[in-house]
Amino acid sequence: MKRKFGKVITWFWAIFGMVSASAGGDFQVGVTSVEITPPGEVALWGQFHLRVSKTPETPLTANIAALQAGETKVTLVSLDLLQLSDELVQAVREAVGKKDAGIPQDSIVMAATHTHTAPTLTTGRSMEQSESKEKAPLPGMAGNENLLTVEETISFLADRISDGIVAAWKNLKPGKMTYGLDRNSIGFGRRVVYANGSAAMYGVTNREDFRNLEGMDDDDVGTIFFLDTADNLLAILVNVACPSQVVEGRHAINADYWRVVREKLQARYGQSVVILGTCSAAGDISPRPLVQKKANERMRQLRGVDEMAEIARRIDLSVSQTWDAVQKAADSQPVLKHQKLRVELPLLNFTEAQYQEIKKMYDHYCRLAADEKTAGQAFMGKAWCGFALKRYELLQKNPDAAWGVEVHVVRIGDTVLCTNPFELFTEYGIRMKARSAATQTFVVQLSGFGSYLPTERALQGGGYSAIPQSCFFSPAGGQKLVDETVKAIQEMFP
């Protein structure tokens, strides 16, 4: 009897094993990297004033991985851009549809690295002009015939990015994946809190009334490795909670620290390996530590590296140590699932007094914009204030007004990758990771327009990134984003 029972158990596990393995289907991977540096002068995005890049310091790239298992297809795209306008996302998907109808447009998952030296993808129009579809010259740029318009820039980027996506799918081959986690300090809290409860982004810390850095750091360095069946590395997706903004004030196109990271990892693993850099929730984090500045500078000098090379050193160390541990765990039949969500989030309301203060600022920027000499200085400020005023007026008519945002959840084996369009404060990312059913969770921000989404504590402290002009949505919206994302993750891990 015991022998027969043992045979039944063996038969059961054999059948269960086949079903479990086949759940992932035949996993295939296609990768490519394409340059997306605009061919000419462009206005740069990422500061309140417009800057013009005449000669790029480094190329910008789109780094792409096409994944398929069974009938499920997903395209992951990392872009050396500040953030993604709705116009660019739509243009890329439409261009892909025209070039290859077999690639599902809704499963193209794009995210920006948040370099502040990338092309402007918005016209910065006032709230009165925001619904217009007509072309609008960038303020303060009249007469510069060499400058690409925003529309021309978006058209160029969409064409190059879509070319890369199509090429990645043409490169599709049987493959494997493995993944892992290491810890290293890449990003640091950038909101300083003082004794009176106020907060300031990049505030001075060597003051008697300094109390603490407001938020939490996230030192996860998460990595997914994609391989062919001969165990050759094809692509590496790296996820760190740190925007790519070391050289954010320059007047030239620059991919920032991800360029240096790619060069270092490709020197280690091969020039053909595609590196997809992604930013986890890091709205209140930057690559520059505000404490122990002199000690950090001393160590860089002793090592003979600059700030970008130091970040690359740390990421390279974490990725290589992770690879050493996980390469033997490569999976040729990982489960691949994708879900695209539209999550309706409540808008952030504010007081009449705040409205009047913002109105004064808006009027100031309008006066600057009226003079061609100062119009460039008012570029973002006018839109920044204008949309806040527009939101306030909407909320007076409908206090429950909400706005839908696009969220993607992608399961790859026992990992999950979940996107959001924000500069999402780190605490929300930690909440997602803590509640996720996946073995390892990759939060990817800046898959869209890039408004800050602060916590309740941050709103109480105020300061840039946590005032009505900086953020469209309330902390209740942040929690709803967490809840809906976690729910979608749970459904993928029954």
Image (cartoon, helix red, strand yellow):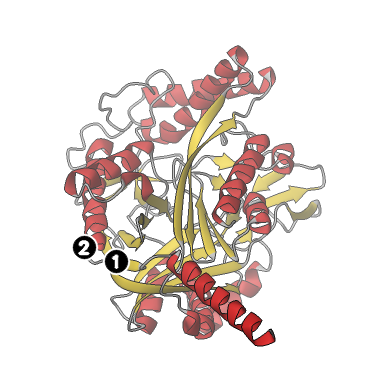
Q: Would you say 227 lies left or right of 327 here?
A: left
The answer to whether 420 is drawn above or below residue 86 in the figure is below
Around disc 2, counting alpha carbons within 10 Å, would you say few (fewer than 14), some (14 to 19), or many (20 or more)? some
- Name the residue rendered at 30%, 66% in the picture: 31
The residue pinned by badge 1 equals 30
Instruction: Give, as a three-letter code, the residue at label 2.
Output: Lys
Residue 463 visible in this rendered orientation of the protein: no
Q: Which label's residue is closer to the chain start, 2 or 1?
A: 1
- Name the residue rendered at 65%, 80% in the picture: 5
Look at the image and tell me in which quarter the N terminus lies: bottom right
Cβ atoms under marks 2 and 1 closer than 8 Å: yes
- Name the residue rendered at 61%, 51% in the picture: 284
SS of the residue under disc 1: strand
Instruction: Give, as a three-letter code, the residue at label 1.
Output: Gly
Estimate the x, y position of residue 272 in percent, counting from the top left.
28, 76
SS of the residue under disc 2: helix
The answer to whether 69 is drawn above or below residue 176 in the figure is above
The residue positioned farthest toward the top in the image shown: 397
Estimate the x, y position of residue 302 in percent, counting from the top left.
55, 83
The residue positioned farthest toward the front in the image shown: 1
* Residue situated in front as seen by the camera: 180 or 361: 180
The answer to whether 309 is drawn above or below residue 276 in the figure is below
Estimate the x, y position of residue 481 in percent, counting from the top left.
60, 42
Residue 414 visible in this rendered orientation of the protein: yes
Look at the image and tell me in which quarter the C terminus lies: bottom right
The residue pinned by badge 2 equals 170
The answer to whether 335 is drawn above or below residue 82 in the figure is below
- Name the residue rendered at 68%, 58% in the picture: 434
